[in-house]
């Protein structure tokens, strides 16, 4: 039976109370913000409550907000040494919770974990986000005991972002090599990587070497003033 997201939002606010930091309902999507110490309790409620019946975790991902707020590109001042990306957004919340003030626990936090849940019986989806408390050693409780599908998703978030999941039964890399150094989806990971690999015919094995690519600044190719795209009355021809 399908129920409205407005009803579900009100039901969650009543049932969970202060266990939710914030809620947002926009574009026919319901998003919840949850403190990390309430992560498992809220997850169990969403999974086992008969009104919600979120039996499927269809996605889990990590997010690095290190450079959040520098999203506006000023390409009009591009030079051979780079270009501006200096637009700052003060007190910006990534999910923009319907005009609500930014939650105190989110300020200064770098890493977050986001899950997407599906309730087949209610024909609805819910997005949930929590923040890691420690930027240097981000940790979130594992959801494997609640949704078994979280297993490989959490391994992926650990591999690419370095987010630890306490209680995970087998937390190891899943996409990069076992000897890989660093986490490639972190914003401060170099674009050219740390090492490069090739097959050595003499040693008959794959070997790792320092990166041979020179670090470089990427400058976008931008057409700033082209009469072909100007209104007809402004063109000389």
Image (spheres, grey):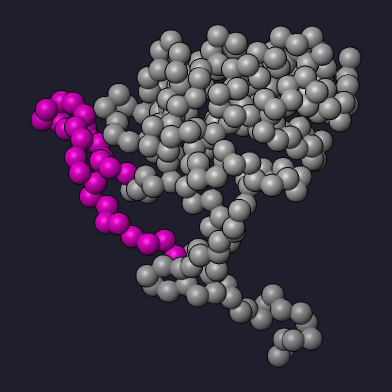
Please state if 234 lies on the left or on the right of 66 as rendered: right
**Residue 188: percent from left, percent from top:** 39, 47
**Residue 191: percent from left, percent from top:** 37, 49
Is residue 71 shown to the viewer in this render? no
Residue ID at (45%, 13%): 167
Residue ID at (75%, 48%): 99
Please state if 157 lies on the left or on the right of 115 as rendered: left
Point out the residue furthest to the left here. Answer: 202
Specify the quadrant of the image occupied by residue 223.
Answer: bottom right
- Check the image and report above or below for 190 versus 58: below
- Check the image and report above or below for 182 versus 17: below
Specify the quadrant that holds the N terminus: top right
Residue 109 in the magenta stretch? The answer is: no
Residue ID at (23%, 50%): 212
- Check the image and report above or below for 161 versus 87: above
**Residue 156: percent from left, percent from top:** 46, 26
Point out the residue furthest to the bottom here. Answer: 236
Specify the quadrant that holds the C terminus: bottom right
Residue ID at (49%, 24%): 140
> Magenta residues?
193-219
**Residue 210: percent from left, percent from top:** 20, 44
- Check the image and report above or below for 110 versus 163: below
Specify the quadrant of the image occupied by residue 69.
Answer: bottom right
Numbered-mark total: 0
Q: Nearer the viewer, residue 22 or 185?
A: 22
Is residue 202 shown to the viewer in this render? yes
Specify the quadrant of the image occupied by residue 136.
Answer: top left
């Amino acid at each position: 039976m399908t129920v409205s997201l407005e009803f579900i939002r009100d039901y969650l606010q009543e049932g969970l109370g202060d266990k939710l930091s914030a809620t947002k309902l926009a574009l026919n999507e319901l998003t919840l913000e949850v403190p990390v110490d309430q992560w498992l309790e809220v997850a169990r409620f969403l999974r086992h409550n008969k009104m919600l019946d979120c039996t499927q975790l269809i996605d889990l991902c990590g997010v690095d907000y290190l450079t959040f707020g520098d999203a506006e590109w000023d390409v009009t001042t591009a030079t051979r040494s780079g270009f501006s990306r200096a637009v700052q957004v003060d007190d910006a919340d990534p999910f923009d919770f319907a005009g609500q003030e930014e939650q105190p626990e989110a300020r200064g936090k770098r890493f977050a974990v986001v899950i997407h849940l599906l309730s087949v019986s209610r024909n609805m989806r819910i997005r949930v986000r929590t923040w890691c408390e420690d930027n240097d050693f981000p940790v979130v409780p594992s959801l494997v005991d609640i949704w078994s599908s979280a297993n490989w998703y959490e391994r992926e978030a650990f591999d690419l972002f370095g987010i630890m999941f306490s209680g995970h039964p087998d937390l190891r890399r899943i996409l990069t090599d076992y000897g890989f150094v660093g986490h490639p989806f972190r914003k401060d990971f170099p674009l050219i990587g740390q090492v490069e690999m090739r097959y050595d015919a003499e040693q008959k094995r794959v070997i790792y070497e320092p990166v041979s690519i020179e670090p470089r600044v990427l400058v976008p190719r931008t057409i700033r003033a082209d009469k072909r795209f100007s209104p007809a009355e402004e063109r000389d021809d």
